[in-house]
Image (spheres, rainbow, N blue to C red):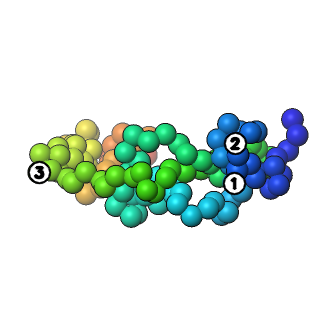
Amino acid sequence: MKRLTLADCFDPDGERFDIPTFPWRLAPEGYATYRQLRACGLRPGGQPVAAQILRPRRRRGPLTAYLYRIDRAMPVRPMTPAKRAALAKANAAQRICPNCRRDAGYRIPRSRGMCGTCVHKEQRAA
């Protein structure tokens, strides 16, 4: 497979990639990524991907970032008290160590499955 060059990433009509495509950091005004929309307090609001930006890499396929139209974006829905309570309850459940049943003070990693104190105790016992 031929490696993608920076010049190959410029397809504003969408003939090659089916949607308008621009090189990394060269997207026109009026487009934003999902993260950029969130930083402005917006969300895509159900609109389809309007364009993409590509960044070629040497050993793997290109990095792709999808772009949305800013003028069609909608404001982020406000956090309701019920949603805030549900998130607090879910985060609290992930802080409880299943071994010692104490609040670890942080979200326990799934890879370990227990708090740092319990992991340290098991390593010393082994």
Residue 47 appears left or right of 80: right
Residue 14 appears left or right of 99: right
Q: Nearer the viewer, residue 46 or 113?
A: 46
Residue 2 appears left or right of 122: right
Residue 49 visible in the shown view:
yes
The residue depicted at 76 percent of the width and 39 percent of the height is 16
Check disc 2: other Cα within 10 Å, few if <14, some if 14-19, many if 20+: some
What is the quadrant of residue 98 in the picture? top left
In this figure, which residue is indicated by the disc labeled 1?
Answer: 22
- Under mark 1, the amino acid is Phe
Check disc 1: other Cα within 10 Å, few if <14, some if 14-19, many if 20+: many
Location of residue 118 with respect to 40 vertically, above or below: above
In this figure, which residue is indicated by the disc labeled 3?
Answer: 81
Residue 88 visible in the shown view:
no
In this figure, which residue is indicated by the disc labeled 2?
Answer: 14
| Separation of marks 2 and 1 at Cα, in angstroms | 10 Å
What is the quadrant of residue 19 in the picture? top right
Check disc 3: other Cα within 10 Å, few if <14, some if 14-19, many if 20+: few
